[in-house]
Amino acid sequence: SILIDKELWNTLSNNGINGVRSNYSWQSHCEKVMQQFSKLLPSRTEAMKKEAPVQSSPKSPSFGKRLISLNRLMISDIDNTLIGDNKSMRELFALLESHRDTLAWGVSTGRSLELTIEAITEYNIPTPDIIICSVGTEIYYGPDLRMDKGWQNHISYQWRPEEIKEVLGDIDFLTFQESEGQRSHKISYYMADDYDYLFWVYYKLEEAGLQCRVIYSHGQFLDIVPVRASKGKAIDYLSYKYEFSPLHVMVAGDSGNDEDMLSGKARGLVVGNYSEELEKLKDRPNIYFSPRKYAAGIIDGLNHYGFI
């Protein structure tokens, strides 16, 4: 039954999406209309074709052409997943380069873009195809760091940052993070690891009627982001946009702020040095817990899922 067979469900779901694109997109609609016109007015249609100047389609951005041409995607968290062991990290980069013709890769992090670039520079990380940063609220492509403005527009729905700051501003156990931790679609605090504190934050936001997502990680970082934003939702968006089957997407992480993307439709990989927050995911059939740490765990996951 498709209700209990996740792989069958994903296959049928992807077939449905592709069918909609083929039969109900604006382009396919126009093509069908023109076919009917050709039957009704063949001579006039041919004349129009001859008269119409040939227009070259605008050149697609290189990152778009690259992503569309590939059939697999690997997205990894940075801190304590991609970085942590230099030797295995270099081995991973060599593998990614050798599979460049079939495998796209990117990073997904809670860091801001500036801090992400800082890490890429410090650890001599090759330029990823995709950067998902600020806990899934921003997406950038390629070496020119082109922002996905469509994603920004999408997640702006019901986002009321000033009201959120006002509601949470008088809570004494929350400390507003430094300016570099704040983004247009992310509000960040420091908070001690206490379940009652987290419950109170949820309560205050719900009481005020504010639709947003609360992400707590590493026992101290509290991020408030739009209800449509998260690492996992950003990866779903990319999978749909560039037509990657969920079975051909692997996500790797180590901590609580990776839970959302690890719990999605993609193949999940948890590195061996994971934090206790992810222990509850051990029974998930689509999540592989590698015994190997840091980048070695990512390599193990790529082998486990047959990506390399």
Image (spheres, grey):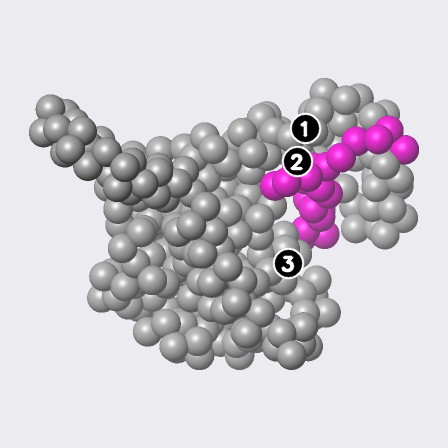
Task: Name the element at disc 1.
Answer: loop
Task: Place residue 50 in its image quadrant.
Answer: top left
Residue beneath the point at 76% across and 27% down: 164
Q: Which residue is mark 3?
A: 259
Residue 52 location, x and y as percent?
Answer: 14, 25
Q: Give the mark nearer the N terminus: 3 vs 2.
A: 2
- Marks 1 and 2 sit apart, C-alpha to C-alpha, by 5 Å
The range drawn in magenta is 207-229
Give the residue displayed 63% in from the left and 55% down from the top. 260
The residue drawn where x is 47% and y is 63% is 15
Percent position (x, y) of residue 256? 66, 56
- What numbered label is drawn on residue 159? 1
CB-based contact (under 8 Å), mark 1 and mark 2: yes
Q: Which of the image's four quarters has the N terminus?
A: bottom right
Q: CA distance from mark 3 to mark 2?
A: 17 Å
Secondary structure category for the residue under label 3 = helix
Whether tag 3 and tag 2 are in contact, CB under 8 A, the answer is no
